[in-house]
Image (cartoon, rainbow, N blue to C red):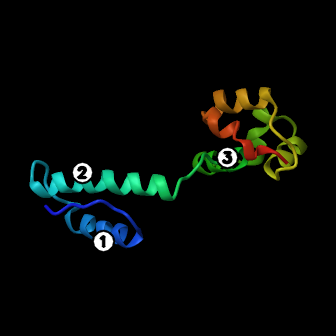
Amino acid sequence: MNIKPIRNDDDLSAAFKRLEAIFQAPGGTPEADEMEVLVTLIESYENQHYPIGPASPVEAIKFRMEQNGLTPRDLEPFIGPSGRVSEVLNGKRRLSLRMIRRLHDGLKIPYENLLAEDAAV
């Protein structure tokens, strides 16, 4: 096992290449231990250099719609009449606190996504 810090994208590529080679290693082997360490190093580097913030409210709603096979009409109990649903999905209307609560409770969309700052129109 020859593990070193990931300091740049070239190191990251090398780490991914090695990880690919040992990814199916049986538990309890030196390769499995190396895999765990590489995953931790890769995650740390990516979180520091390529952070991903929470999805916007509209992205979160559309994602949940896709997951559950929902149509805009299915959102009416959570958002209101079809015109309001359309405005929300097109980014022309912000979510109210009542809509946020209903979407969270009914569709289990995390509050952090529904309250994301880029919800502003």
Q: Are marks 2 and 3 in contact (CB under 8 Å)?
A: no
Tag 3: residue type? Leu
Local secondary structure at mark 3: loop
Q: Residue at x 71, y 44 (%)?
A: 57
Tell which of 97 and 18 is nearer to you. Answer: 18
Q: Which mark identifies residue 36?
A: 2
Give the labeled residue for mark 3: 70
In the figure, 40 relative to 98: above or below? below
Circle 1 sits in a helix, a strand or a loop, which is it? helix
Q: At which x and y percent is residue 102?
A: 72, 28
For the N terminus, the image quarter is bottom left
Q: Disc 1 designates what residue?
A: 14
In the drawing, does residue 68 fall left or right of residue 47? right
Q: Quadrant of residue 80?
A: top right
Name the foreground residue: 89 vs 19.
19
Q: Amino acid at mark 2?
A: Glu
